[in-house]
Amino acid sequence: MRSQTRTIERHERILEAALDVFTRSGFQDAVVDDIADAASTSKGGLYFHFPGKDALFLAVLDRTAMLLRSRLELALAMEAEPLARLETTLRALLQTFGAHRKAARLFLIDTPGAGPRFHRRMMTLRAEFTGLIVAELENAVAAGVIAPVDCRVAAQVWFGGIHEIVSQWALAEDPEDLLARLPALRALLLRSVGTAA
Amino acid sequence: MRSQTRTIERHERILEAALDVFTRSGFQDAVVDDIADAASTSKGGLYFHFPGKDALFLAVLDRTAMLLRSRLELALAMEAEPLARLETTLRALLQTFGAHRKAARLFLIDTPGAGPRFHRRMMTLRAEFTGLIVAELENAVAAGVIAPVDCRVAAQVWFGGIHEIVSQWALAEDPEDLLARLPALRALLLRSVGTAA
Amino acid sequence: MRSQTRTIERHERILEAALDVFTRSGFQDAVVDDIADAASTSKGGLYFHFPGKDALFLAVLDRTAMLLRSRLELALAMEAEPLARLETTLRALLQTFGAHRKAARLFLIDTPGAGPRFHRRMMTLRAEFTGLIVAELENAVAAGVIAPVDCRVAAQVWFGGIHEIVSQWALAEDPEDLLARLPALRALLLRSVGTAA
Amino acid sequence: MRSQTRTIERHERILEAALDVFTRSGFQDAVVDDIADAASTSKGGLYFHFPGKDALFLAVLDRTAMLLRSRLELALAMEAEPLARLETTLRALLQTFGAHRKAARLFLIDTPGAGPRFHRRMMTLRAEFTGLIVAELENAVAAGVIAPVDCRVAAQVWFGGIHEIVSQWALAEDPEDLLARLPALRALLLRSVGTAA
DNA sequence: GATGAATGAGCATTCATTCAT
DNA sequence: AATGAATGAATGCTCATTCAT
């Protein structure tokens, strides 16, 4: 009941604090004590909720992936047109990352650097999102609205392009609006699969 | 001198060992002792050649960038045709990374994860290579062989696409030949800037 | 009352669980959580019944001593003959330890290792049991059935001999019956005080 | 050369300090920092010489066993007579422990309490010393100077008796001379194997 | 009486860096 | 130039104990 709620709140607060500290310092330089402080709890309290620093990082990572996933699903729910779905996927990714700079840093920058023992999970998550793009591309190919490209490679290029643009923005000292890059990026990517924007 | 030679050899051996250990364990988990061992020297010897772990990492990074740079220059030296130069740039990058998997890991995966204090240098290096692509793209636009695209964004997409493909390959357990991806990638990227391959 | 009963049961269950965990892990490595789990209660519940880990250990120790004491009293109740009482003491100790391996471990092995702050209590308990043996020996000396030995030292040798034999058995991976050692031990100890077995 | 010597000295100083701290606080309550301080070195220095607290404890234990062993060998070197060897064994043990109270505490009291993961080594060491006694007893039996007893059990009784007497002395607040117990103990133990002292 | 979330002092261990030899 | 012993600050994690519910 009440305690349920409080436990979940605490859980959530720790994840929030961890996202903050991890993206500020990187995984290795992030200190568990700092995360606990940022979550207004004690180190012991943190370890009650998460078995260790690694697990905490993975939990934050999964939570970030979940956020991204749900945003994408929400945005795509209203689109049926293959080309529109492709454009929506692109816009939704930029919008979501643009609204969650820390999530972007965690997902795109900190996770590779967290060390080899996180690579597998990172690969899995990337494969998941690349897979979404692959599906949309195949969809569009089947509908004949784009050229019959190698969807796997195309999706990697799309993801890579987004990755690079978002990364630069996430690391910039004084970042402008990420969505400002959308038109040029959309033109490039759509043209890359044989459609004039 | 003889000692000159020996010093340079030692210097080189340490860099080689560092590349090895850094890419195997990531920057943070790499232990200076291990690097010294791998270089068949002592910790003290290592510290004679490099002021510290950070500087050593940057030295390896610069050495890797130098390798990449020289390979690109070599490959481009023989090309005059704007479109050919673009294709060559692409092929040379895949070839070089394909022949130096550890360099690829270091450059694309380990450096972001090395921590925020390396981000600036990483940004600089990436800007350099993106800049090369920008130059080639502007060259091609000026020659009228590709569409008048936003070369900055286009270069980021090119770099991002390459980054993603090489990263996946560099992290794969059982990687096939990286150059196998070249045709599809070239088709995508050239089409993205308005040229049919 | 019903609750009375339940409380006592819980109390008992905790002591039983504590004996188990203490003898499995040693005092220091035994974790209060594990004891609570083994007793099918919560940590808070355990702390309702016992003020702390130290007190719990002492309670288990006292309970074990009590067991030993009562078994000895029971066995000796039927014996009047000094020599028979000595033999009975010996047999009763081996029988009791043999039937309660965990008690043996706790009493003879874990308690010394529980740390200096338990030494006093340990000494007291050992003195008590050595005292029982002293009494029987003096009894026998007075009756003239054994030689006029230094009963204090003799009791220590008796206790030490039993201690060693029981310890080895308690720590053995695959222990045989402890009583198998009785004849040889009895012969030795009786002869040590001047009586042919 | 010089550094060899200094390294060995440091090594030795750490072992000495560890013996001190372990016997003062018990294994678990002994703090590595304290040992380092007591050895006038740093924690890091300690860890350069020993891989961990466990290993350090075992090293101290082995060193103590070595001391005991060499004292016994020395004392027995001059004795040929089976009975004299038995008596010498007994006296040497009491003398050595009497002169090294900390060694006695470590060997007889702290080691059992150091936790189950040390039990095996402890058993091995005890078996070694019991084995020495067994050999002497068998020797004496063969020579016909003591009764044909079960030498294994007899040795355990001897070791146990010594153990008990030394333990009491090692734990006493104000211990008298351990050798004062020798005559009574010798009488008891010799009589236990069928010889009048 | 019981629960289990929370606390926080305590601790073993790591490791980049220094420096006497 | 090179060695490796020594340093000590830093940090992840444990766990006995408390207490609001």
Image (cartoon, coloured by chain):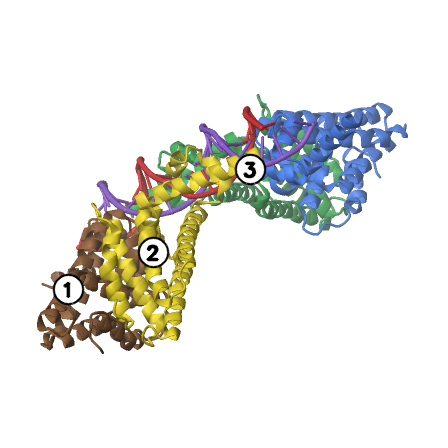
Chain colours: A green, B blue, C brown, D yellow, E red, F purple
- Which residue corresponds to the image point at 81% horizontal and 44% vertical from the top-left? B183
Query: Marks 1 and 2, Cα distance to the nearest angstrom?
Result: 25 Å
Of the pair A30 and D45, the residue shown nearer to us: D45
Please state if A13 lies on the left or on the right of B119 as rendered. Answer: left
Few, some or many residues within 10 Å of mark 3 (<14, 14–19, 20+): few
Please state if B141 lies on the left or on the right of C60 as rendered. Answer: right
Q: Quadrant of residue C62?
A: bottom left
The chain ID associated with circle 3 is D
The secondary element bearing badge 1 is classed as helix
The secondary element bearing badge 2 is classed as helix
In the image, what residue type sits under mark 3? Gln
Residue B124 vs D189, above or below: the answer is above
Earlier in the chain: of badge 2 and badge 3, it is 3
Residue D132 percent location from the top left of the image = 40, 63
Say which residue label 3 marks: D4
The chain ID associated with circle 2 is D
Residue D89 percent location from the top left of the image = 35, 60
Query: Marks 1 and 3, Cα distance to the nearest angstrom?
Result: 55 Å
In the image, what residue type sits under mark 1? Val
- Which residue corresponds to the image point at 33% horizontal and 44% vertical from the top-left? D29
Of the pair A33 and A97, the residue shown nearer to us: A33
Residue D60 visible in the current orientation: yes
